Amino acid sequence: MKFKLIYPKWEKLDRQTPFILPPHGPVVFAAALPDYVEVDFIDENIQEIDFDQPADFVGISVMLSAQIKRAWEVADKFRKKKIKVIFGGIATMLHAEETQNHADCVFLGEAEGRMEQVFSDFKNGRLQKVYNYMQDFPSIESAGTARRDILDREKYNYRGVQMVDLVHASRGCRFNCYPCCVNFLGGRNFRPRPLDKVVEEMTSIDNNRLFLVDNSLAQDKNWEIQLFKEMIPLKKKWCCHPIENDDTVLDLAAQAGAWFVYQTVFDTSDFIRNRIKRYHDYGIAVEGSILLGLDYHSEDYIKRMVDFLFEIELDMAEFTVLTPFPHTKTYDDLHNAERIFSYDWNDYTSGKVVFQPKMLTPEELQSLYYYAWDKFYEEEPSNYKMFKLLKKVMDKEKADGTYKPRVRQPLKQERKF
């Protein structure tokens, strides 16, 4: 069976360095497909979709709300050709009801152990409109090694530098952050994968640079310690979301190749100051995630926040605007207060103001968003700061003998950046 799996394009954040990472959802989904399914994967961010190419069945994997309307357009084109379309992924779960208007089938939940039935139903003309496995999670042991063979890997580099490959060591999250929908998607229980399977998958990846996409590694200290101990012999270099603020954990993370972390910088407190210093003490760089537009954010507060980032010597920063994604408390609060003025999902890039802030006008918040990006990268542009991070990881790779020279690209391709 020829199955065309599509990952739709979307609008990237303004001011962000224009690199593209290989997607995680589609390769994890592909690993759950029956053996007889022949996968033709198209990442529309780096490839064009050939709507005339033969396919028995089309799947659309959607991670972001900003992708969903493009996903509907793609689905509508295939359905006009009488080709059935199945949707899955995070944004499908967030926009399930609307998506049913553009799909022959909507799959909700995690795919492991469920695809044999779905594809059997398709072959026998019994494809259901909705397969709903939300909160009915398969055994975490069933999550196998992702199918990275479906990727056109050579296209995932930035100016000839190999980008990270994405991998996960756990699912679910015990935290309940205000703007986050992970609890709805993956549940409140932390579900770690067996360490031998995690190590097996990491070993199989022909790339020394990884991104552990777990919501947070700081969920179970003992598990974290064992994970990093198992990773040390791999000599991989990796980034992730927060790590436990503990000497033993941080030391092991550094030994295991921790390159940098994405750490939320939510205020200008000594807690945050010390948190960043602790990472730096262990040679781990930090890219701060700074959310703008909370109810206590004034112009002075946001400008003070940006100044604080220089004080703590943050290595990089990514600024986003509070965005009320469906199935979050943020959405419920702002929707119920009638403060959301745009429900156009194309605007939900996390870089556009779609609601009425409490202490600012929408225009003022949008202007401060651009101010934050421009001010932080005024002296050193984002691509230069990224180069410094890459230089650090290359130095570490050279020290342990894992460095691979950059891949030279034709001049024509380099000029695109």
Image (cartoon, rainbow, N blue to C red):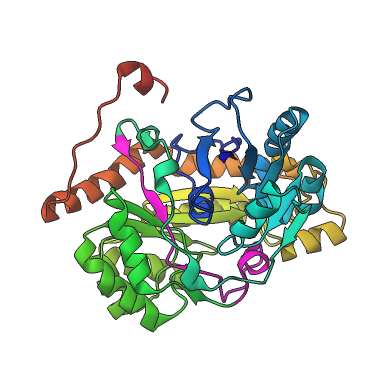
Q: What residue span does the magenta drawing correspond to?
A: 161-188
Residue 387 drawn at (x, y percent): 30, 40
Q: Is residue 413 visible?
A: yes
Task: State the residue in front, 219 or 321.
Answer: 219
Q: Is residue 259 visible?
A: no
The residue at 30%/71% (across/down) is 228
Residue 273 drawn at (x, y percent): 41, 67
Task: State the residue in front, 178 or 141.
Answer: 141
Asked if residue 178 is among those painted magenta in the image, a careful observer would answer: yes
Residue 58 drawn at (x, y percent): 64, 39
Task: State the residue in front, 245 or 314.
Answer: 245
45 relative to 278 in the view: left or right: right
Q: Residue furthest bottom?
A: 222
Relative vertical location of residue 110 with respect to residue 72 in this rendering, above or below: below
Task: State the residue in front, 31 or 381.
Answer: 31
Q: Residue furthest top?
A: 412
The residue at 50%/28% (across/down) is 47
Count of marks placed on residues: 0
Residue 341 drawn at (x, y percent): 83, 45
Q: Looking at the figure, which quarter contains the C terminus? A: top left
Q: In terms of image quadrants, where is residue 77?
A: top right
The residue at 83%/57% (across/down) is 335
Relative vertical location of residue 286 with respect to residue 165 in this rendering, above or below: below
Q: Looking at the figure, which quarter contains the N terminus? A: top right
Asked if residue 50 is among those painted magenta in the image, a careful observer would answer: no
243 relative to 321 in the view: left or right: left
